[in-house]
Amino acid sequence: MPKIRFPEGFLWGAATAAYQIEGAVEEDGRGPSIWDTFSHTPGAVINGDTGDHACDHYHRWEKDLDLLSDLGVGSYRFSVAWPRIVPTGSGAINAKGLDFYDRLVDALVDRQIQPMVTLYHWDLPQGLQDVGGWVNRDTTDRFVDYVRAVHDRLGDRVPYWLTLNEPYCSAIVGHLEGRHAPGIRDEAKAVTAIHHLLLAHGKAVQALRADGVTGKVGITCNLTSPHPASENAADLDAAARLDLHENRMFLDPLFRGSYPDDAAAHYKGVTDFPFVQDGDLETISEPLDFFGINYYERHLVTTDPADPVRGWTRVPDPKPTTVGIGVHPEGLREVLERVSADYTDLPLFVTETGICLHDYVDPEGQVKDDERVEFFDSHIRAAHQAIQNGVNLAGFFPWSLMDNYEWAWGYAYRFGMYYVDYATQERIPKRSAQWFSKITRANGID
Ligand code: IFM
């Protein structure tokens, strides 16, 4: 294999999110979020797992930052828990919540690791859900209040801000599929939530700029690379509709200031977009400094005979991973090239990609996650190929720094480069951590 070198200054990182690692859900004034409610709802999460304790990162954060130093990363992508800052979602700011992230950011700066802060990674304060959550337009303004408070405290030391993580999941998985909090199954509400999430993003970008933000501002979307199962018109059409649903409903408003041309026809009978007000799309398409992409899935798709007008069916992958999706590094290259060709020449960051395995500690005390090493190797090569093909890719952040609370899959599924023994909270470097620490130091693969 040839040596693969990344451009000088390429940012290697690692990613986590607040509810997935912090625990300490009742400490220092934190209020409940929709994920506290959802995870405590019987039947919602495998084994009834909750994020009550998670990786106990709230108490162990200093040692966890040492793991980042061991990995040799230049950046750490973490999220701020909105309910720690505004416990009920509106009203008074909780200074103790800000204190926690203030200490974290200081310690990262001391270690010469650049903070990349995600402002919303799914933990909406329950108080806002009680009045409609993302289906209520008012939530967009409450998000701005919260963002300003975080920026006010951390803005002098944060070089990268991400407004939202994966609005698709918040809107579609949370409001149409009901598999994530708030557990709603209503397509009109899901499309309304898409709009309000994007609007909250745009308003937050404007507020950060008005408040003199010095860091770069972006958003992270999870994107897929849908392929038709055949060249039949019906399959081509199904792939185009899946692409609308998963990708274009987010990319078009963000970068073109409009919903896709085929959206009105696709959602006919569901919604005619009454929630879009004058000026919203200008706000949503406020220019950004960079764009974050999370990539996990490629998707081979065929038409759904039961619903050929609006439906599609994903063809099962011949070599499924633990969670039933295949490993397709070429899909990452396709996504990067597509965004760069069709939407923006802004710097792109892979803010997440990763593989979930049932890792275990062997009798020698090691975690040999060779499949994860292979996964990262192939995806890093695909990212490098995208750069060779002209994509302005500026960084790569594996998901995840350590095993954590994998939402509706609880703790049964592991994504980390560090193994977490949840009984003792010991962190054990997996082979992937050892491997990745060589990549970050070499700025490439030998
Ligand atoms: O764990 C999640 C993360 O919170 C968002 N992106 C996908 C990851 C793996 O499922």
Image (spheres, rainbow, N blue to C red):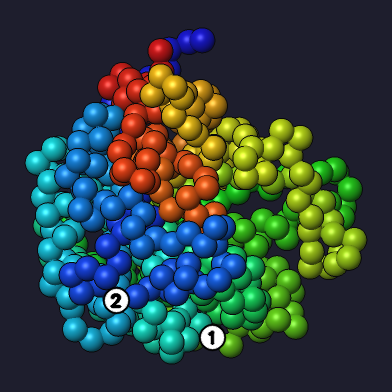
Ligand 1 within 8 Å of the CB at mark 2: no
| Residue 437: x %, y % from top left | 32, 25
> Going 66% across and 43% down the picture, which residue do you hit?
325
Q: Is residue 83 left or right of residue 148?
A: right
Mark 2 surroundings: few (<14), some (14-19) or many (≥20) residues within 10 A: many
In the rendered structure, find residue 31 and report the number of the disc placed on it: 2
Q: Of residues 122 and 269, which is closer to you in this image?
A: 122
| Residue 387: x %, y % from top left | 46, 31
Q: Is residue 23 left or right of residue 234?
A: left
Residue occupied by mark 1: 275
Locate the C terminus by quadrant. top left
> Going 49% across and 27% down the picture, which residue do you hit?
369
| Residue 186: x %, y % from top left | 65, 79
Mark 1 surroundings: few (<14), some (14-19) or many (≥20) residues within 10 A: some
Do tag 2 and tag 1 residues touch (Cβ < 8 Å)?
no
> Going 36% across and 54% down the picture, which residue do you hit?
54
Q: Is residue 170 left or right of residue 298?
A: left
Element at label 1: loop
Q: Amino acid at mark 2?
A: Gly
The disc, 2 or 1, on the residue closer to the chain's N-terminal end is: 2
Disc 2 vs disc 1: which is toward the camera?
2
Residue 388 visible to the viewer: no
Q: Mark 2 and mark 1: span between their CA atoms?
A: 29 Å
Q: Is residue 324 left or right of residue 92?
A: right
